[in-house]
Structures are given as C-alpha cells and as structure tokens.
C-alpha cells in the first residue's frame, strides 16, 4: 500500500517544494497511477529482493491502479503477483453522499479555489492538524456529521479512538487538479482521462474530449476485489 504524492508521508521532491511550487501539485490520479505506483513498486522490490510484489489500493488507490493497468498492463504483469482493490472505484455518479452531489451542482467551491489559485487542499499544517484532533476529541458528534457528509453512512458505529487517529492524519494533502478530475468523472458518469479543454485535449489525446480509460485493456494481472 503506497503513499500517494502530497499526503503527510509523501511530500519530498528532488527540486520542488510543496509549500512554494505549484508545479508539485500538478497531478491527478493518472500521475499517481503511472508514475507514483511504478516508483513505489520498484523501490519495494529493490528493498526486499522479491521478484514480484502485491499492490493494495483502497478507493482512489484502486482507481489509480486501474488506470495504470489500462495504460501499461505488461509492465505491471512483470512486477505484480496480485492487485488487491479495497472499495474499488472507477465511477462515482451514483454516490449519494452530499459532498459529491454538491461538487457537481455547486460551482462556488471550485471557483474559489481557482480564483485564489489554491493548488494544495487541507495540507499538512500542524496547527490545522492539532485543531482537527482537538475538535474530534471534545466534539465527537461534529466528526460524525462531517464523516456522514463526505464518506460514511454510519459513523456512529466506528471506534472513537481509531477515528481520532484518522482525524489527526486526515489533513494529509490533496490538490485542486485531482479534485477537478473526480468532478469530471462524476459529471460525465464515465471513467475518463483528465479534461484540459478542447485545445489541449487535441494536443494530448488527438480528440476534443478526453477518452475513456479503457479497462478492457487490463490483462494478465490477478485482481482481488473487496467491495
């Protein structure tokens, strides 16, 4: 299970500073799949000496690997003995959580992010992390409401001590482009590549609209799905 770029454990770069360089945040699930996943697999193999490794991806982690497998299935066949997809996802159009529905219909959030050029979202800020942890500690009902709004239909059954640890680490970092990519997948109701607009799409893809991510191209890699 890898740490995708931008999270609390993956903010180092050879020459880019996540606090100062917007270029660090110029990625979506595509780059996390084709670049980061390959780098992690190579590193694990180098450290362990194993010929093949098992890759575990949860939710977005599964989506980035599905994308990577659709683009370069042969490479991953040589390096993976199994891909374990936890809560696998390629489409979110039927997601009933309020956050995702508002992401479609309310444009003010993305407009604000674009206006203020905010590329880094809920980043690794110690003040924010400590405040979030304190809030979860003294007001667990608030945490349940936020969880229910975003991703959890029954937060009341969760172990509170585990939730506290999650709430502290959850301020791990995400970015505007990745959020935009998921919004596009949500709106188009298909698993599609990032939409840069017609002009850049023609340069990158040769078509005015982004192509679908073709999952039929995945082959020769064993996959275990846990829904």
Image (cartoon, rainbow, N blue to C red):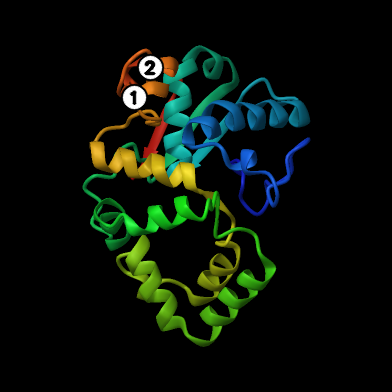
Q: Kindly indicate whether the residue at mark 2 contacts the one at mark 1 (C-beta within 8 angstroms).
A: yes
The residue most toward the bottom is 138
Task: Find residue 81 and name its label.
Answer: none
Q: Position of residue 41 (x, y in %)?
A: 64, 29
Q: Is residue 165 left or right of residue 95?
A: right
Q: Is residue 106 left or right of residue 224?
A: left
Q: Is residue 79 left or right of residue 11?
A: left
In the figure, 128 relative to 22: above or below?
Answer: below
Q: Is residue 182 at least partly visible in the picture?
A: yes
Q: Position of residue 79 (x, y in %)?
A: 60, 20
The residue located at (39%, 18%) in the rendering is 218
The quadrant in which the C terminus is found is: top left
Q: Position of residue 220 (x, y in %)?
A: 44, 15
Q: Is residue 58 at least partly visible in the picture?
A: no
Of 223 and 94, nearer the camera is: 94
Mark 1 lies on residue: 198
Mark 2 lies on residue: 202
For the residues labelled 1 and 2, the Cα–Cα distance comes to 6 Å
The residue located at (59%, 27%) in the rendering is 35
The residue most toward the front is 115
Instruction: Using a 10 Å C-alpha cutoff, classify the residue at mark 2 as few (fewer than 14 neighbours), some (14 to 19) or many (20 or more).
Output: some
Of 13 and 139, nearer the camera is: 13
Is label 2 in a helix, a strand or a loop?
A: helix
Dividing the picture into quarters, in which one does residue 101 lie?
Answer: bottom left
Q: Position of residue 53 (x, y in %)?
A: 61, 28
The residue located at (70%, 24%) in the rendering is 50
Is label 1 in a helix, a strand or a loop?
A: helix
Instruction: Using a 10 Å C-alpha cutoff, classify the residue at mark 1 as few (fewer than 14 neighbours), some (14 to 19) or many (20 or more).
Output: some
Dividing the picture into quarters, in which one does residue 168 lie?
Answer: bottom right
């Amino acid at each position: 299970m890898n740490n995708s770029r931008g999270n609390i454990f993956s903010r180092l770069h050879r020459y880019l500073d996540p606090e100062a360089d917007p270029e660090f945040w110029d990625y979506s699930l595509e780059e996390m799949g084709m670049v980061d996943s390959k780098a992690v697999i190579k590193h694990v193999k180098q450290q362990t000496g194993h010929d093949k490794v098992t890759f575990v991806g949860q939710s977005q982690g599964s989506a980035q690997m599905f994308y990577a497998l659709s683009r370069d299935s042969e490479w991953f066949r040589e390096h993976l003995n199994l891909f374990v997809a936890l809560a696998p996802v390629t489409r979110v159009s039927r997601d009933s959580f309020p956050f995702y529905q508002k992401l479609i219909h309310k444009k003010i959030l993305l407009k604000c992010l674009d206006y203020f050029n905010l590329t880094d979202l809920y980043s690794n800020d110690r003040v924010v992390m400590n405040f979030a942890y304190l809030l979860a500690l003294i007001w667990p009902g608030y945490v349940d409401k936020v969880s229910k709004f975003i991703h959890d239909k029954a937060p009341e059954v969760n172990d509170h001590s585990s939730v506290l640890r999650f709430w502290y680490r959850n301020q791990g970092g995400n970015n505007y482009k990745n959020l935009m990519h998921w919004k596009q997948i949500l709106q188009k109701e298909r698993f599609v590549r990032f939409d840069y607009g017609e002009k850049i799409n023609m340069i990158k893809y040769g078509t005015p609209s982004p192509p679908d991510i073709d999952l039929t191209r995945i082959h020769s890699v064993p996959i275990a799905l846990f829904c």
